[in-house]
Image (spheres, rainbow, N blue to C red):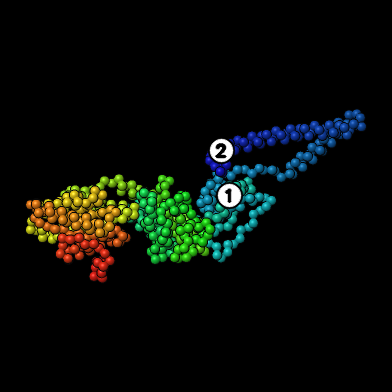
Amino acid sequence: MDPYRGWGLRADMSEVSMRREAQGIRSIGRGLALGGGAAATLAIALLLTDSIDGPSRWPVALLIEGVVVVAAIVAWKSLPPIRPSAPPNRLMRTAIDDPLVNATLGTGSFNRSSSAEEPAPAPTNPPPSAPAHTTAAVDIPSQFAIPAQFAIPAQFDIPAHFARLRFDQRLEAALDAARNEEEVLGVVTRAAESISPIAPTELLLAGARGTTIRQAAEAGPDGEGPGCPVPHPGECEAMRLGTTRRYPSSSGFDACPHLRGRIGGPCSATCVPVRVLGRSIGVLHRTDPVHGPADEAVVATLESLASKSGTRLSIVRAATNTAPAAFDASTGLLDRASTERHVFDLGRDLTPFSLAQGDIDHFQEYLRVNGRDAANLAIRLVARVMQEILRPSDVIGRFGEDEFLVILPQASDGQAQRALERVREHLALTLATSAIPWFTVSFGVVESSFAQTLDDLLVAADVAVSMAKDLGRNRVVVANEELIDPRVEDDF
């Protein structure tokens, strides 16, 4: 710790008072020393003139004493003054405490041990390969010499420092504008690409229960991350220890075991934990060639990205979890936004599910023939039948005027198909004893593993619904690879 840290005006005034007191004490000491020396010289002179009798003895003794005293004073004055090293003034303390101010003063490096006996070497011209911003060394007077234990780094890269500040400002602005987790992950992807477009980087996030881990964002030369095969958060050293881990070579004896045996061959790696309130929720993982690992500046930037994105993710998740679900006023089902939020939650926790889209067949014709009241009764009847037949854990939402979306967690597409067949049959039985005009519903089912995003799942389910209508309506069709033929791919 800097012993001069925290000095202020009062400390400076105390220095002045102490120096004045020291000067006074030195003056008194000099007077006493002169008086004692004069008395001793007089005694010696009297002994030397002991053989002289009469009144001439004292003049001779005083003459001898005067010569000795004058010689002593001349010799004393000719000696160089001894000046103790004074503590740094406030300007120098600022330079010690703040490397940026130090560098701004034009001191690429300080000569911290320069003195009158050992002058600092003269600054030399930088080599042609040196950066343009490199400055010459500046000699500091000996009274301002800084002790070695309080030395600061010799070089401070001002352009890199301000580039880092600019990156942090842009990152914070982009994250603040992100409204949901998907947008936050998009910012992370673009930020990783801006740091290095050729270094594979990925963000791995733990599930809500901390037992699973998934790749949430990735960037690289082909848009792909390094693909860390870590199976769960407990196997990740960076997440488990809560500190940045750097591996110069994947073949090193101290390298993470999940770096070995990768398809791309040996590599170096940097793993930065994403921590929120002292808990690791993910890791930012980047790989580089063995001969070119990420330097300190890149690691510091990755740590900033991990810290700020983790904070924004926690805020977005908290807002999402506390936001009340919105319901459709007509049917009492969840609205579209709330239904999509359930899909995102299942995907984030890596929970498998099946998604089904249902449409009332010939709804516009049904509305034209039977009127709005009958159409509203038909919509509410479909909602009630699905609530009666499906499980309490299944999520049912109204996705459009006559469209419904059903999320069935932990259900395969075959199980979802059978459940919706029961819905279709129960709807027919209810209509047989009801005054509501007859209608039917077609469903398209897709399993969560069929696509990577919600949009792709919705497109696949919509294709399956269209196929159900083409096959005669009033049926359930499951989306599969055979269904996505060249004729249908144009719709994607």
- Residue flagged by tag 1: what amino acid is it? Ala
Q: Residue at x 31, y 60 (%)?
A: 449
Q: Position of residue 263 (x, y in %)?
A: 44, 65
Query: Which is more toward the observer, 152 or 228?
Result: 228
Q: Residue at x 12, y 54 (%)?
A: 429
Crowding around mark 2 (Cα neighbors within 10 Å: few <14, some 14 to 19, many 20+) is: few
Q: Nearer the viewer, mark 2 or mark 1?
A: 1
Is the residue under label 1 in contact with that under label 2 (CB below 8 Å)?
no
Q: Position of residue 448 (x, y in %)?
A: 29, 58
Q: Residue at x 7, y 58 (%)?
A: 369
Q: Quadrant of the N terminus?
A: top right
Res. 36 image quadrant: top right
- The label on residue 11 is 2
Q: Residue at x 43, y 64 (%)?
A: 198
- The label on residue 363 is none
Crowding around mark 1 (Cα neighbors within 10 Å: few <14, some 14 to 19, many 20+) is: some
Residue beneath label 1, please? 151
Task: Residue lying at the far bottom in this picture: please name it.
Answer: 486
- Distance from disc 2 to disc 1, alpha carbons, whole Å, reads 22 Å
Res. 14 image quadrant: top right
Q: Position of residue 460 (x, y in %)?
A: 25, 62
Q: Position of residue 481 (x, y in %)?
A: 28, 66
Query: Which is more toward the observer, 170 or 254?
Result: 254
